[in-house]
């Protein structure tokens, strides 16, 4: 497998470049004393808030954010509410949030949360056929509640423009179909397709997914690595982290090492992207893919 | 039933007939699996230029996988046959002795903390884990190698390892599906290398094993006779157990946990008529190999029908546990001598003083748990920053609910230990908790997201369904406590396997299920706490009414009958009460606390022996342990809160080991 050819600095630079036109639209935050104090129990909602320029005061599992969401880095001063299965209610209550954002995943906490403050449940993932429709609705609903509808419209329009430009750049590259995987160990992968975030992005920017097998409700499937055997010409993209014994194990497998796409060195690695993310994660995934594919052409 | 009858008829050529039948079935399944790819490979030969997917998958995935199934089945079955022989225990196996669970936990720890070890050191890691859990099981039962005690200890250690793994997954990593995959044993292969490596290792182990066959056979004559023939029984035992542990660790290291093959294959060999140990070892290995091959080939044939990932190990457990239930009546388990309770052990305080001390300690704990905590910035403080608001809204309900659940489980544990004369009996191994988990899992996976109320209802239904089943199975034996416990163990394993299958696919709901199993008291509503408290008060009070039975039953069946206790009826009532208590407590603090095991032992140490004060003190001890666990869970890792149930297991289990290790005189058997 090749190391990721794109250096971190360049990626961060590009990230800022991509967001900079949006930033200019945001009203100054510091002066906004009346802003709602919002706690988010869902990362996708938290990242959407960050994109709308309204930082949450507290989020769940903040300690792992930089490992799974990666970008944007979590701004300093956001309070960690603990594990998502074990929210620190005393802490949350002491913060006296105006609004608590929840998802269907923490539904069972609803009665306890309602003792603390107003809640708003937003479902990030619906198995809808229309890519991003759910995320757009979610962004608007959230923005309305935060009084940032205009920012949201600008953000969504910017995102659409961004996706369109990515699509144009992709069509110039004529990329191979991609196989998106997470290595579980030396013998198993999770492969993505169906109607998950990654698939939505691939469709939006015009990259075809080589995985035609079934996936579960969330758009992925756990399979033995032998299920990836194919004579099709494709590019395998593996998300980090890759367990350390995976590469040596695979190198010794004829089934793997003689695969056409392995022989042709069409295997790349991407940093993690939040699978249950919203538009910001989708934009980031699209950017990572296009940087990767363009980097390969050079 | 018919299967076992047939086995009996075929006794003369039993093992051969059984192996042939299995071989025929396995061959049929393998043929279905291989027909298309083999004919494709033959037709195209090596002529195809480029990558021939069908041929590559056949040669480097399907065939090594089938060979791996044969090897793993044989290795595990041999390990089981050895353990059953050494311990003279028909229920011994790598699964029931906790050997598997130790390897699994060690691999999970290595995955999380020292992933670099997993390359070449995987075997060593698995071996270390297996050895550690085996030593622990033997330390728990000490020298009383009674069949049921050792299996109960094995189950307790397995459950503990499971609790630790669950904690790791919850705290360290949200999407760590690979731990589930290893825990459920997937045979998926992509080269011959692991198969060949395992074959070598098993072949090397076979050499010392061959030398042990004769002395192990002589062990059947009894320790004394064996000794007079010049065999060092202790050394032989140690060596043989070590070999069994190595065999099973190697298999676990190669493919993960394959449940129950090591139990079922030797039982089948024995029941089909293999008499001498040498025969049993050979036939067990063959039967084990064929069983696993049959299971895996069939699973691969069926894989097309399901998009979900089905690990073989979990499926073998799924299939084997009903078989174990079926075979149970065929197996003779030694009846234990009546409980002899020596009146003066431990601190031997005057009884009234002991009771006073117990309740005073409990009161102090409760005060600590309610008042001491962490402020929003994380500093320790003796009074909550929000004052009474915090106490009434958050701390009081969760503390009260934890205490109520602890009291319920503690009392249930005492009842079960008295009823079964077994100090390792506890509600956790009765199967009621497992039934509750299963029902919650089903409701999560079938109905999607469920609310707390529905979870409570589901867990109660599941708990009672298992209870009904256990009572039904137990009725045939007049509620003989050992049978009931064994049935509970088999059901727990069955349900564990189902949960494993659900989780291995990496479904995000598995995390919700884990969260539920970890026993969260977080956010308990005042109403729930009041209900739990009332329930505990009523049920503990009800247990006091049975004090006469609880005094007499441990003297043994004959004695009890002579004293006018209706055996079947009294056992039924006590089991029912224990199960109701468990079903009420499980939704609050989860199924993995071990408090039902711990509380009675804490009380034993204080020297309280009479049933009435023991019941009250056990309730208090159970409540105390849970209150302490709840406080630790809430404060120790601020701002993280840990699940109370798992913290109870973490904190309590080592403490329990200490108690058990110094018991010696408490239960003289």
Image (cartoon, helix red, strand yellow):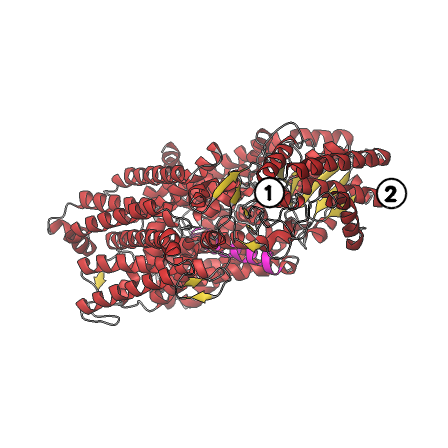
Magenta segment, principal secondary structure?
Answer: helix
Q: Earlier in the sequence, mark 2 or mark 1?
A: 1
Q: Which residue is mark 1?
A: A45
- Secondary structure type for disc 2: helix
Q: Quadrant of residue B439?
A: top left
Q: Chain of mark 1?
A: A
Q: Determine the residue positioned at 75% across, 32% down.
A: A208
Left or right for A121, reference B403: right
**Quadrant holding the C terminus of chain A:** top right
Q: Is residue B186 magenta?
A: no
Q: In this rendering, do the residues under marks 2 and 1 share a single chain?
A: yes
Q: From the viewer's perspective, is residue A55 above or below residue A130?
A: below
Number of on-image labels: 2
Q: Position of residue B429 (x, y in %)?
A: 36, 50
Q: Determine the residue positioned at 60% across, 53% down.
A: A64
Evaluate whether residue B100 shows in this view. no
- Label 2: few (<14), some (14–19) or many (≥20) C-alpha neighbours in 10 Å: few
- Secondary structure type for disc 1: helix
Q: Position of residue B414 (x, y in %)?
A: 26, 55
User: In this orientation, which residue lies closer to the viewer: A97 or A276?
Assistant: A97
> Outermost residue, top direction?
A129
User: In this orientation, which residue lies closer to the viewer: B601 or B210?
Assistant: B601
- Label 1: few (<14), some (14–19) or many (≥20) C-alpha neighbours in 10 Å: many
Q: Chain of mark 2?
A: A
Q: Which residue is mark 2?
A: A297
Q: Determine the residue positioned at 29% across, 47% down.
A: B530
Left or right for B595, reference A50: left
Q: From the viewer's perspective, is residue B512 above or below residue A230?
A: below
Left or right for B465, reference B75: left
Question: In the rendered structure, which segment of residues is drawn in magenta?
Answer: B93-114
């Amino acid at each position: 497998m090749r190391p990721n050819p794109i250096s971190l600095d360049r990626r961060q630079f590009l990230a800022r470049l991509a967001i900079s036109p949006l930033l200019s639209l945001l009203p100054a935050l510091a002066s906004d004393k009346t802003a709602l104090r919002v706690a988010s129990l869902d990362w996708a909602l938290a990242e959407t808030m960050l994109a709308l320029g309204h930082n949450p005061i507290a989020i769940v599992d903040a300690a792992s954010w930089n490992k799974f969401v990666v970008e944007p880095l979590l701004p300093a001063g956001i309070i960690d509410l603990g594990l998502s299965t074990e929210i620190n209610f005393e802490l949350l209550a002491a913060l006296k949030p105006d609004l608590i954002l929840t998802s269907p995943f923490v539904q069972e906490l609803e009665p306890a949360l309602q003792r603390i403050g107003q809640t708003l449940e937003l479902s990030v993932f619906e198995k809808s056929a229309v890519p991003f429709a759910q995320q757009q609705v979610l962004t608007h609903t959230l923005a309305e509640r935060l009084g940032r509808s205009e920012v949201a419209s600008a953000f969504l329009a910017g995102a659409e423009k961004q996706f369109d430009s990515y699509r144009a750049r992709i069509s110039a590259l004529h990329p191979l179909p991609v196989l998106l995987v997470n290595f579980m160990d030396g013998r198993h992968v999770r492969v993505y397709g169906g109607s998950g975030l990654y698939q939505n992005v691939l469709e939006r920017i015009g990259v075809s997914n080589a995985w035609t097998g079934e996936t579960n409700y969330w758009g992925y499937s756990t399979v033995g690595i032998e299920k990836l055997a194919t004579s099709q010409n494709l590019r395998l993209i593996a998300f980090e982290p890759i367990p350390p014994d995976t590469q040596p194990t695979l190198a010794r497998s004829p089934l793997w090492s003689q695969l056409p796409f392995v022989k042709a060195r069409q295997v790349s690695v991407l940093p993690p992207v939040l699978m249950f993310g919203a538009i910001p994660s989708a934009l980031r995934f699209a950017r990572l893919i296009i940087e990767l594919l363009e980097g390969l052409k050079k | 039933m018919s299967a076992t009858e047939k086995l009996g008829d075929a006794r003369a050529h039993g093992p051969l007939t059984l192996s042939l039948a299995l071989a025929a079935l396995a061959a049929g399944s393998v043929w279905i699996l291989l027909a298309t790819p083999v004919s494709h490979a033959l037709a195209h030969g090596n002529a195809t230029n480029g990558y021939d997917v069908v041929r590559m998958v056949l040669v480097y995935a399907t065939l090594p996988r089938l060979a791996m199934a044969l090897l793993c089945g044989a290795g595990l079955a041999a390990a089981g046959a050895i353990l059953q022989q050494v311990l003279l225990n028909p229920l011994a196996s790598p699964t029931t002795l906790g050997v598997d669970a130790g390897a699994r936990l060690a691999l999970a720890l290595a995955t999380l903390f020292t992933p670099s070890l997993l390359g070449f050191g995987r075997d060593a890691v698995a071996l270390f884990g297996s050895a550690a859990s085996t030593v622990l099981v033997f330390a728990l039962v000490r020298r009383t190698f009674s069949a049921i005690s050792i299996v109960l200890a094995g189950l307790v250690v397995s459950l503990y390892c499971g609790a630790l793994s669950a904690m790791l997954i919850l705290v360290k990593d949200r999407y760590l599906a690979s731990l589930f995959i290893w825990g459920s044993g997937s045979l998926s292969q992509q080269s011959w290398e692991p198969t060949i490596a395992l074959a070598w290792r098993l072949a090397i182990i076979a050499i010392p094993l061959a030398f042990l066959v004769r002395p192990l056979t002589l062990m059947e004559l009894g320790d004394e006779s064996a000794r007079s023939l010049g065999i060092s029984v202790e050394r032989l035992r140690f060596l043989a157990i070590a070999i069994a542990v190595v065999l099973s660790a190697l298999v676990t290291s190669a493919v993960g946990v394959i449940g129950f093959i090591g139990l079922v294959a030797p039982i089948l060999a024995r029941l089909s008529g293999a008499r001498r140990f040498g025969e049993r070892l050979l036939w067990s290995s063959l039967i084990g190999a064929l069983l696993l091959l049959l299971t895996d080939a069939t699973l691969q044939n069926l894989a097309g029908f399901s998009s979900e990932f089905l690990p073989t190990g979990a499926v073998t457990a799924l299939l084997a546990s009903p078989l174990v239930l079926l075979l149970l009546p065929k197996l003779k388990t030694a009846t234990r001598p009546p409980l002899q309770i020596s009146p003066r052990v431990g601190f031997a305080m005057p009884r009234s003083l002991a009771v006073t001390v117990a309740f005073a300690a409990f009161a102090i704990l409760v005060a600590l748990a309610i008042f001491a905590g962490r402020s929003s910035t994380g500093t320790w403080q003796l009074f909550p920053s929000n004052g009474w608001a915090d106490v009434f809204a958050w701390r009081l309900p969760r503390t009260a609910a934890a205490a109520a659940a602890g009291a319920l489980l503690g009392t249930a544990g005492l009842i079960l230990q008295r009823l079964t004369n077994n100090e390792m009996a506890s509600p956790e191994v009765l199967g009621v908790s497992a039934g509750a988990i299963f029902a919650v899992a089903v409701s999560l996976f079938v109905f999607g997201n469920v609310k707390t109320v529905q979870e409570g209802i589901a867990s109660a239904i599941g708990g009672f369904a298992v209870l009904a089943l256990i009572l039904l199975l137990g009725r045939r034996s007049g509620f003989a406590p050992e049978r009931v416990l064994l049935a509970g163990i088999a059901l727990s394993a069955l349900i564990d396997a189902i949960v494993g299958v659900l989780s291995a696919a990496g479904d995000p709901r598995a995390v919700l299920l884990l969260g539920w199993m970890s026993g969260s008291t977080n956010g308990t509503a005042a109403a729930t706490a009041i209900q739990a408290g009332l329930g505990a008060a009523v049920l503990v009070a009800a247990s006091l009414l049975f004090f006469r039975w609880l005094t007499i039953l441990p003297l043994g069946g004959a004695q009890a009958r002579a004293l006018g206790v209706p055996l079947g009826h009294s056992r039924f009532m006590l089991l029912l009460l224990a199960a109701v208590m468990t079903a009420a407590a499980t939704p609050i603090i989860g199924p993995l606390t071990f408090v039902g095991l711990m509380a009675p032992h804490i009380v034993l140490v204080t020297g309280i022996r009479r049933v009435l004060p023991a019941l009250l003190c056990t309730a208090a001890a159970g409540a105390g342990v849970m209150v302490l666990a709840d406080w630790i869970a809430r404060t120790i890792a601020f701002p993280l809160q840990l699940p109370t149930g798992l913290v109870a297991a973490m904190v309590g289990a080592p403490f329990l080991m200490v108690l058990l290790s110094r018991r010696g005189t408490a239960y003289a058997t």
